């Protein structure tokens, strides 16, 4: 049986007390689960028995870059970082060139990267650990891609990049997760909304098996 990779993305949600509450109710502990949280709650989420990630990183090293969080600072808390999420591309104008710089910074300090792409045509930088295929129209809409199409797109991504672990993301829930992970080319999932509630996220993980 394949080892599934399950990543959660809290996006811009939860304060420290809310993160602490979530932890009290989340009982699944495994290395193949990586939770990607806001910078401000990394500290309270560190040292648990699941992997921890940030959702962005500066394209610059440490220095005079007001407001940025450098890769070295992220790596104090997390082993993983999401780069290239479509919300960063859309709302913050992040380009493939900028994202390549972020990936380079992340690799300089040894952060592992979940790199998001909206299709199988998007440039993927070198040395990416995990790719997540997330069609823009499926994110947060309740309208997921079909498992068959996601599988076909992921096969193309694998054929044209050096990445061997590729996830599907976009409106994955406890109810539809099994249909995605049962596809042969899909190695796991990236979950946004359904990772915010610890009970729903636990149910989703259970159903993925
Ligand atoms: P969603 O988000 O699961 O809420 O659709 C997925 C993502 O943005 O990674």
Image (spheres, rainbow, N blue to C red):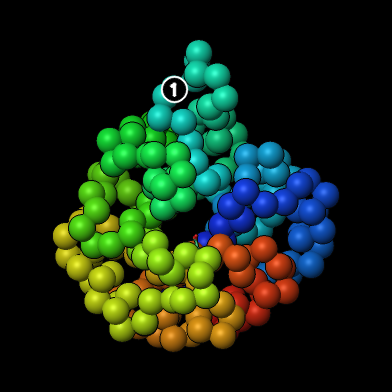
Q: Residue at x 72, y 74 (%)?
A: 199
Is residue 84 visible in the rendered structure shown here?
yes
User: Looking at the image, which is closer to me, 110 or 189?
Assistant: 189
On the image, numbered disc 1 is attached to which residue?
61
16 sits to left or right of 62: right
Q: Is residue 197 above or below residue 97?
A: below
Q: Is residue 76 above or below residue 37?
A: above
Is residue 33 visible in the rendered structure shown here?
no
x, y percent for residue 108: 38, 31
**Disc 1 Cβ-to-ligand 1 distance below 8 Å:** no
Q: Quadrant where the N terminus lies?
A: bottom left
112 sits to left or right of 199: left
158 sits to left or right of 145: left
User: Looking at the image, which is closer to me, 94 or 168?
Assistant: 94
Q: Residue at x 56, y 57 (%)?
A: 9
Q: Secondary structure at mark 1?
A: loop
Quadrant in the picture for residue 100: top left
x, y percent for residue 6: 51, 67
Q: Is residue 101 above or below residue 134?
A: above
Could you tell me how many numbered marks the image carries?
A: 1
Label 1 neighbourhood size at 10 Å, few (<14), some (14-19), many (20+)?
A: some
Q: Residue furthest top?
A: 64
User: Looking at the image, which is closer to me, 188 or 117?
Assistant: 117
34 sits to left or right of 13: left
x, y percent for residue 156: 20, 68
Q: Residue at x 51, y 70 (%)?
A: 141
x, y percent for residue 72: 51, 29
Q: Residue at x 76, y 47 (%)?
A: 15
């Amino acid at each position: 049986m394949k080892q599934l990779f399950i990543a959660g993305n809290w996006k811009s949600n939860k304060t420290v007390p809310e993160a602490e509450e979530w932890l009290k109710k989340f009982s699944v502990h495994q290395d193949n689960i990586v939770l990607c949280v806001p910078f401000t709650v990394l500290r309270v989420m560190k040292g648990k028995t699941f992997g921890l990630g940030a959702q962005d990183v500066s394209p610059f090293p440490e220095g005079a870059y007001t407001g940025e969080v450098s890769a070295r600072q992220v790596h104090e808390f997390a082993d993983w970082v999401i780069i290239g999420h479509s919300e960063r591309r859309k709302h913050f104008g992040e380009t493939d060139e900028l994202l390549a710089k972020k990936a380079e910074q992340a690799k300089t300090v040894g952060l592992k990267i979940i790199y998001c792409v909206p299709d199988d045509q998007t440039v993927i930088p070198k040395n990416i650990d995990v790719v997540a295929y997330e069609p823009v129209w499926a994110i947060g809409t309740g309208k997921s891609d079909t498992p068959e199409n996601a599988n076909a797109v992921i096969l193309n991504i694998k054929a044209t990049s050096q990445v061997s672990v590729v996830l599907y993301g976009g409106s994955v829930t406890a109810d539809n997760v099994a249909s995605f992970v049962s596809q042969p080319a899909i190695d796991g999932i990236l979950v946004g909304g359904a990772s915010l509630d610890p009970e729903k996220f636990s149910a989703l993980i259970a159903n993925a098996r």
